[in-house]
Amino acid sequence: MTNRISKETIKITLVKSVIGTKKSHKATIYGLGLRKLNSSSVLVNTPEARGMIRKINYLIKID
């Protein structure tokens, strides 16, 4: 049997507050698994995740 190669991952951290942002941006933050300030999430590097990250890039840090 062959081992499946794991896909690349992206780690993101919420570094700015979501207070005062658009509702759609808040929903995107929660959709990426970020809840509180300085919380981190590890995501699979897919076009969908990259698009969500691009939308809220001013609120997060990519590690």
Image (cartoon, rainbow, N blue to C red):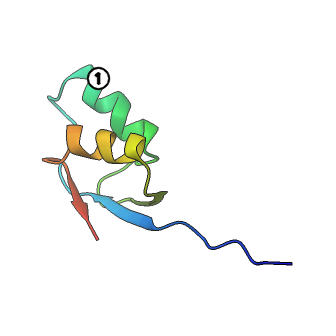
Q: Give the vertical position of 11 relative to 3 (above or below).
A: above
What type is the residue that disc 1 sits on? Ser
Q: Give the vertical position of 28 relative to 16 (above or below).
A: above
- Quadrant (top left/top right/bottom left/bottom right) for the C terminus: bottom left
User: Which residue is outermost to the top?
Assistant: 23
Q: Position of residue 19 (x, y in %)?
A: 19, 34
Q: Quadrant of residue 56?
A: top left
Q: Is residue 3 left or right of residue 56?
A: right
Q: Is residue 31 left or right of residue 63?
A: right
Q: Position of residue 8 (x, y in %)?
A: 47, 68
Using the image as rendered, state which of residue 39 and residue 48 is in the foreground.
Answer: 48
Residue labelled with disc 1: 24
Q: Position of residue 22 (x, y in %)?
A: 19, 23
Q: Quadrant of residue 28?
A: top left
Q: Residue at x 34, y 40 (%)?
A: 29
Circle 1 SS class: helix
Q: Position of residue 26 (x, y in %)?
A: 30, 31
Q: Residue at x 41, y 40 (%)?
A: 48
Structural crowding at the residue carrying mark 1, measured as other residues with C-alpha within 10 Å and reported as few (<14), some (14–19) or many (≥20) = few
Total count of labels: 1
- Quadrant (top left/top right/bottom left/bottom right) for the N terminus: bottom right
Q: Is residue 2 left or right of residue 63?
A: right
